[in-house]
Image: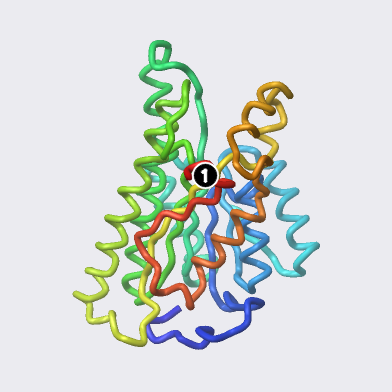
Amino acid sequence: MSSTDTTNQGADTAGKLTGRVAFVTGGTRGIGAAICHSLANQGASVAAGYSSNTEKAEKFQADYEAEFGVPVSVHQGNIGSAEDCRRTVAEVIDKHGRLDILINNAGITIDKTVAKMTDEDWHKVLDVNLSGAFFMSQAALAHMVDRGSGRIINVSSVIGETGNIGQANYAASKSGLFGLTKTMAKEALYSLKKAGKLTEDSIGITVNTVTPGFIATEMMDSIPEKVMDKITAQIPLARLGRPEEIARVVHFLAADASSYITGQVWGVNGGMDM
């Protein structure tokens, strides 16, 4: 993406991200893996971040390359470390020569009531879910402003809107992404304008957030049936979401043709926030 990249503005859905490079944190499993596949289906070159499970990352890499016939790079790091955030962004740019799309998807939970939550429980979740998104975006934005365009998409949660018993740290971190998104969206455009790279035919730099509801991933497998029944009873559509339903919104926001959407929060939650 350059500041004058408009070649895909009227293109069909397939291939609308051809020539783009996307970095998806937490990209080797669950929603992140679905996002990687969705971006690849649109023609993007993909880099996937992971924290520690090298075996799973290698399997993801092999399966991806078998399906798409092209390599995917994987990058290990602790998203709660500012140094690792900067290092992995630099690795992706060095490997692929550019970075057009950053998906801040990595996240963790440590569920306890406020009364029982330790200092470490609080800080670790905030470090990964919120500070990690900040440091990843900070590193990517410098590159995007220099190139004149880019896309940053944060993956929040409906819990950031509604709260949930036992998830004060998680809810705070996911809610914090809303303010971070809106501020970064404004600063990105301010920086582009200051650099003389914000023109009428520019696709600019956009920053948006997607807020999934309860999604059918392996994280949900351990939930007892009775608890799952209570969860689905809260969802107007009466079912869990599918990872590809989140991924579809992400690749839509990543496209050139979505250049007039920035600073927005997109709920994909089966109607839970109605």
Q: Position of residue 225 (x, y in %)?
A: 73, 24
Q: Is residue 239 above or below residue 89?
A: above
Q: Nearer the viewer, residue 272 or 93?
A: 272
Q: Is residue 76 visible?
A: no
Q: Is residue 124 left or right of residue 200?
A: right
Residue occupying image coordinates x 54% and y 60%: 250
Q: Position of residue 49 (x, y in %)?
A: 56, 50
Residue occupying image coordinates x 36% and y 70%: 205
Check disc 1 and report its element: helix, strand or loop: loop
Q: Nearer the viewer, residue 227 or 167?
A: 227
Image quadrant assignment for residue 260: bottom left
Q: Position of residue 140 (x, y in %)?
A: 39, 61
Image quadrant assignment for residue 198: bottom left
Q: Amino acid at mark 1?
A: Ala
User: Which residue ends up furthest to the left in the rendered image?
Assistant: 194
Residue occupying image coordinates x 64% and y 45%: 237
Disc 1 target residue: 106
